[in-house]
Structure formats: C-alpha cells, structure tokens
Image (cartoon, rainbow, N blue to C red):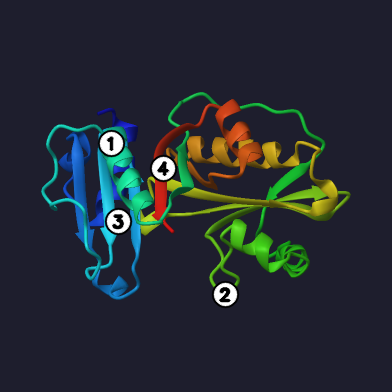
Amino acid sequence: MNTKLQKIYEERAKFYNLELSTFESEGATVLEVESLRNENYFTIAEFDKHLVIRVDPEMELLFDKTMTSGKSPKELLNIIEAHYKNLGRTLSKTFCFYYYLKDEKLNVESDLMIERITNSNSGKLDVFLDGLSEEEIDLADIELDNLDPVIFGGFVQGNMKGYVSHRYPNGHTGLADIGIVIDQAYRGKRFGKAMLVHEVNWCLRNEIIPMYVLLDSNESSKGLVESLGFEKICDLYMLE
C-alpha cells in the first residue's frame, strides 16, 4: 500500500473503528451500530478488497458476521443484492468517494478570479451563501454555522460566483474533503473545473490529499473528476 492510499485507509479505519489491515483482506466486516437501532438501516462501503457493512442491530442478516471466506467484494455484493431483491428491497449505490493520488499539479484556462476568503472579503461570501438554495447548500455540504477552515471564492467583476472549500474528515488533516457550488447563471462555463483545479493545487502545495464525494447519479461531476485524474476508492450502497 503506497503512502497516499495508506492515509486514505487510515482515515476510513478511524471512521469505522477498524484496524488498517482490514482493508487489505478479502471479505466483509459487519458493524452493528447501536445508534441505528430499530431504524432498519443497512449500508455497504465497497473498497478494492473489502466490504464494510453498517447495520441496525435489530436487522436479521443473511450471513454470519465472520463471513470472509475468500469471496471478492463484487461476489459478496451480488449475494447480498440477490437476497434482498427476493425480499422486495433494493440495494442502491448512493455515493462515490474519489481521491487525487497524483503529484502533478493541474492546469485550466478560465476568466474566473479565485481568491481565498478572509475577513476582508467575507461579506461577499455572505452575499453568495444567502443566494443559495437549501439543496445547493446540502450538495456542497456547507454548514452555515460552522464554515470550513479553507474557502476560496471565484469572482467575476468583483462579485462572487463560485465557492470551493474543504474540511478535514474525522480530523485527519492529511485529507481534504472538497465541496463546490457555482452560481446557477454561471454554470456551463467551466468555472466548476477552475475552482476544483485551484483547490487541488492548493492541497498539493500543502501535502494534503484531495477527496471528492459525489452522488452516484451525478454523471457530469463524475466525468469532471475522472478527467482531472481522480481515482474512485470507495462506493457506498444503501438498502432501500
């Protein structure tokens, strides 16, 4: 496991309270999450070699918790999906976790002026955020009462039209979980790409691994991050 992948798996191991070595073995780990009791909750995180399954302790499972009998994640997913399909339930892919593992900085041509948000221009950030819908705020994972530590604004003629920020997942300062939102009137002008490239390059200068979590249904954003060289490390599934 190279250094960057190890950092990624260290953060995921901390999130799931697992040993780092878990992600290097084929099979599945089932975690009963007490806070989900009686919610009929079931998610699967699919990594290269391992599945991490989080469940409501009250759910009846189709396999033993120690089910690691040499099956690949894909084989186990097929077994689980077929089982619950017979029960009238659907296993749906919800989120994709992408990471930029390269060392090369990115380039993009854009008329957008990008500046870090500080006290001197925070008023323009407030105006931009006030103009966003709840859906846009949710998709960019913006917490209005607890803004991310690093935020950049994209400006057109002095007005903020784009936002990109990152937070440190689970306090892991070696990873940057990125969120982006562009003013609706300025979408389709490659501003999102320019903002993401700026953020990635900032991360590289600071020896931080950029990560981007996307809805599986967001094909345009998946195409963007893949075109820039991001690699998908994990898919998240939920039982509906």
**Amino acid type, callout 3:** Phe
Question: In this figure, which residue is indicated by the disc labeled 2?
Answer: 145
Distance from Cα at disc 1 to Cα at disc 3: 20 Å
Q: Nearer the viewer, residue 60 or 195?
A: 60
Q: How many marks?
A: 4
Distance from Cα at disc 2 to Cα at disc 4: 29 Å
Judge depth for marks 1 and 3 and give the one in front: 1
Of label 2 and label 3, which has the lower sequence position?
Answer: 3
Of label 1 and label 3, which has the lower sequence position?
Answer: 3
Please state if 14 lies on the left or on the right of 159 as rendered. left
Question: Residue 3, position in %: x, y?
Answer: 29, 31
Classify mark 4: residues with Cα within 10 Å, few (<14), some (14-19) or many (20+): many
Judge depth for marks 2 and 3 and give the one in front: 3
Please state if 50 lies on the left or on the right of 85 as rendered. left
**Amino acid type, callout 1:** Pro
Question: Residue 64, position in %: x, y?
Answer: 13, 52
Distance from Cα at disc 4 to Cα at disc 1: 11 Å
Number of the label disc, if any, that sits on residue 15: 3
Of label 4 and label 1, which has the lower sequence position?
Answer: 1
Instruction: Report which quarter residue 208 is drawn in.
Output: top left
**Amino acid type, callout 4:** Asp
Classify mark 2: residues with Cα within 10 Å, few (<14), some (14-19) or many (20+): few
Question: Residue 109, position in %: x, y?
Answer: 76, 28
Question: In this figure, which residue is indicated by the disc labeled 1?
Answer: 73
The residue shown at (21%, 58%) is: 61
- Check disc 3 and report its element: helix, strand or loop: helix
**Amino acid type, callout 2:** Asp
* Residue at the right extreme, as displayed: 157
Position of the C terminus, as image quadrant, is: bottom left
Question: In this figure, which residue is indicated by the disc labeled 4?
Answer: 235
